[in-house]
Image (cartoon, rainbow, N blue to C red):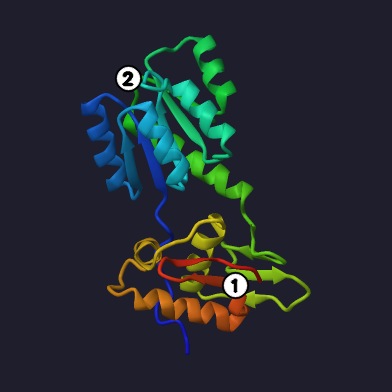
Amino acid sequence: MTDAHPQPQPPRPRLLLVEDEADLAGLLEGLLISEGYDVDVARDGQRGLHLGLTGDHDVLVVDRGLPAIEGVDLVRRLRGRAVTAPVLMLTARGTTDDRVEGLDAGAEDYLVKPFDVDELLARLRALLRRHRDVAESLSLGTRTLSPEQRLVTGGGQPDVELSPREAALLEVLARRPERVFSRSELLDRVFDDADTTGSVDTYVHYLRRKLGRDVVRTVRGSGYRLGSA
């Protein structure tokens, strides 16, 4: 059986916005959603810490001046808990010392308010590109997935070419190997034009047929997670 959908949309990047200024947070949330991001919003550092530790985000936008937990401290805590997603820090302060402190805390980029939204979007795209380039090949245990080539290699086994939809599904699982994804989450991230979670089960079956049953694990009552191949 061949893949009936040769050109799926790539998984939408998931972004955490931590901003306490209500008007700015609302403006940025709408803008980022219109640009293709899935957006979670936190209005203080404590909520930002919770979402940052549990949300599996691809990129974070963090205001420096936050209530509860200040932005620089928030980034330090996330880095200390092995959250590696790139961080763009927003600030009303533009001194060199402020930038250095934010970068030393673990932020990858720094943008001073007021800023141009086109520059914000361009910087986010650059952060995502750099982050994805670092993880160009994703581990599947003894084998490796190259998302751009849609190719699984290694493990002393023949290379396996995946369909676009198969590769997109496996990429989502491989980027968060410890996380269990519900069927509805995978449907939303990979199968934009499908309307039933049965599409997820079908493509899990395709992956197992090509790569072995252990490549995707079923977590009863919860969904799927990456196995090993």
SS for dot 1: helix
Does residue 122 appear anywhere in the picture? no
Q: Is residue 5 left or right of residue 208?
A: left
**Callout 2, which amino acid?**
Pro
Task: Identify which residue is drawn at 56% across, 60% down.
Answer: 174
Spatial CA distance of label 2 from label 1 is 47 Å
**Callout 1, which amino acid?**
Val
- Give the image location of residue 192, x and y in percent: 33, 66
- Name which quarter of the figure residue 64 lies in: top left
| Front disc: 2 or 1 | 1
Judge whether 136 appears above or below 126 on screen. Answer: below
Judge whether 206 appears above or below 129 on screen. Answer: below
Q: Is residue 203 left or right of residue 175?
A: left
Along the line of sight, which residue is nearer the eye, 53 or 115? 53
- Give the image location of residue 22, x and y in percent: 22, 27
Q: Earlier in the sequence, mark 2 or mark 1?
A: 2
SS for dot 2: loop
Residue lying at the far right of the rendered structure: 156
Does residue 166 appear anywhere in the picture? yes
Judge whether 144 appears above or below 19 on screen. Answer: below
Q: Residue under circle 2?
A: 114
Q: Residue under circle 1?
A: 215
Point out the image quarter for the C terminus.
bottom right
